[in-house]
Amino acid sequence: MNRTSRRLTQRGLLSAVLGAAVCTTYTACAPRPSAAVVAGAANSDIVVAEFENAGWDGWVARGTAFGSGPALGVRVGQLDIRGNHGSGSASSELDGDKPMGTLTSPAFTIARQFISFGVGGGDYEHHACMNLIVDGKTVRRATGYNSDTLRPVSWDVRPFLGKSAHIQIVDEAKGDWGHINVDHILQTNQPDRLPVVSQPLYQETYRPQFHFTARQWTVDRLNPGMRQEGWLNDLNGLVYYDGEYHLFAQRWNKCWIHAISRDLVHWTELEPAFWEEELDSAVQSGNCVIDYENTSGLSLDKSTPPMVAFWSRNDNRSHGITYSLDHGRTWKFYAHNPILVYPERDPMVFWHKPTQRWVMMMYGDGQYHIFTSHNLLEWKDEKHPIPNSYECPDFFQLPLDDDQAHMKWVLIRGNGKYSVGSFDGSEFKEETPQFDSDAGPNFYATQSWGNTDTGDGRRIQAAWMRDGVYPDMPFNQQVTFPCELTLHTTPDGPRLHREPIQQIASLHKHEDQWADRTLAAGETWDLKETGDLFHIKMDVDIPEGATLRFHIRGVPVTLTRQTVACGTDPKPISGQLKTVEILVDRTSIEVFANHGELSISKCFLPDESGLSLKADGAGITIPSLSVFHLNSAWKKNDGAIAFSKKAGS
């Protein structure tokens, strides 16, 4: 099929797309094209580059990757480049995968609605890619797919019509697939292939509406994988500072995702805080502290304390820091990294007031090692490792039964297992076995916000809901809803409770309420609820031998007198089940029993709608049931998507 025919097959789809404001996940919402622009669809394409000549024709090559000109003629075949237009292609593989450099176009004015091109080579966002630069900022990016066949790609550039731009082809990668090939760059109103992301940002089919997920900033990609825009995994550096909650998370060691909030419900995602120093060097999991006394000397002004982030390189031995002097908006790498060389990773640092020094917990060889420092830069091994501990430690104090005179230390492992004990600044003495802080199938790399003693003092926890599935979405993975942690006395010793923070009420839209309902054995009660966002509160009285099954959009939550199950085996509670609280988002369910004594976090893909309950084995009494329909934490505004004004700036 020739190019003209391909254009004709796109025409109907393109007309439908242009008939309304086109929103994508990498722009909040592109403006509706003016009549003049739409009429311009008949205008001819504008060639940005065809790479058919021996030289670069005004493009500027720096470094050694791109040589003195494009790959031409037989050289294209030798490099196994396929799908190019004509006889040439820009390539950074002329001398293999090791050379690195950039190739930058002359400035041009964006005068069509799309920029289309063919791209192949390595799939390394940020390191082997083609960037569109407007006002000095990368606004669009594309990579190859670990193939030298050039695939057609297009960028929607309507938000930048009339602006001056550059294209920069980047190769900062070496090793396997450490190159990029590009050809046939056009400004066009009818690209061979439209962008694949078409749903509005934060309104995608399976995008959670009050659980944090990562967005795409520059790429056009569905089903992003590890290290790609839209992916999210381990939580890092949760810290409260000066009225803002900061959430950092891994893009699988490539960079630290960053978002801020003033209420832990409405989040504003910022661009990544910082990236790995070079390809595959990594900035693995860690945490953040506020160095109020400037013990590190990283700030020249003590009134501007540094926010310091700790992380590990991919060698699982070298640990470094980056720091910010402007509330996390910009970051610098410490000039003398690494600050510590010790196997393995995931440093977690906090200030220990009684000993007036910093303490670091770090995972290594199946245990947590304890280090101390007076300045965050030089560390001493206290040689009191904590056994049976794996990855992503979280360590903090909580009052037992809300008694500030009776404080206990809680250590939570990466898998959510916790134990309670005492800590003297160098040694943790466990006083309990390990228990689940959450018993669900999708709960990992838990962290809690530090420095909240400068705010309301609550200990708030969140975790990566690992292994969720979101087919054909431009994001991947989500975070649990923030939960407050409290410590309670039980006949079997102290136990951790976790409950949704009270700010969930800020999303309440309307409430449906029932009281004193009895279900006979075998009876089903259809609540006749529509929607996909719910906050459910229920009191139950379940006799021995009876089971209450709460079907939530096709997912059963199974309740008995002393157990709860949701995608799990039945999980026991210490006494009779009396209260149940459930958060339902588009692709997640979180269940809390007896005021957080037990919690279960589960991802799901809905295959039904509605809510219903069924009693089995015996009759069941439901003294009260409230179903709150929820608003999205994301807010529509004049056709675009913006965060609620409650979000931090």
Image: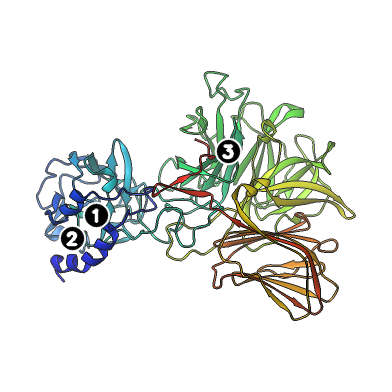
Q: Which mark, by number, is residue 369?
A: none
Q: Is residue 164 left or right of residue 612?
A: left
Task: Check whether the beta carbons of the residues at disc 2 and disc 3 lie within 8 A of each other.
Answer: no
Task: Check whether the beta carbons of the residues at disc 2 and disc 1 lie within 8 A of each other.
Answer: yes
Q: What's the amino acid at mark 3?
A: Arg
Q: Which mark, by number, is residue 181?
A: 1
Most foreground residue, 326 or 508: 508
Disc 3 crowd, CA 10 A, few/some/many (<14, 14-19, 20+): some
Task: Give residue 532's position: percent from left, percent from top.
Answer: 56, 63
Q: Is residue 446 above or below residue 61?
A: below
Q: Which mark, by number, is residue 262?
A: 3
Q: CA distance from mark 2 to mark 1?
A: 9 Å
Most foreground residue, 96 or 27: 27
* Mark nearer the N terminus (2 vs 3): 2
Q: CA distance from mark 1 to mark 3?
A: 44 Å
Query: Which residue is under mark 2?
Result: 84
Task: Check whether the beta carbons of the residues at disc 1 and disc 3 lie within 8 A of each other.
Answer: no
Task: Give residue 203's position: percent from left, percent from top.
Answer: 45, 56
Q: CA distance from mark 2 to mark 3?
A: 50 Å
- Of helix, strand and loop, which one carries label 3? loop
Residue positioned 83% across, 76% down in the render: 545
Task: Give residue 406's position: percent from left, percent from top.
Answer: 85, 38
- Of helix, strand and loop, which one carries label 2? loop
Q: Nearer the viewer, mark 1 or mark 3?
A: 3
* Mark nearer the N terminus (2 vs 1): 2
Give the farthest residue toward the left.
Answer: 53
Residue 343, visible in the rendered structure:
no
Most foreground residue, 71 or 10: 10
Please identify the quadrant where the N terminus is shown. Answer: bottom left
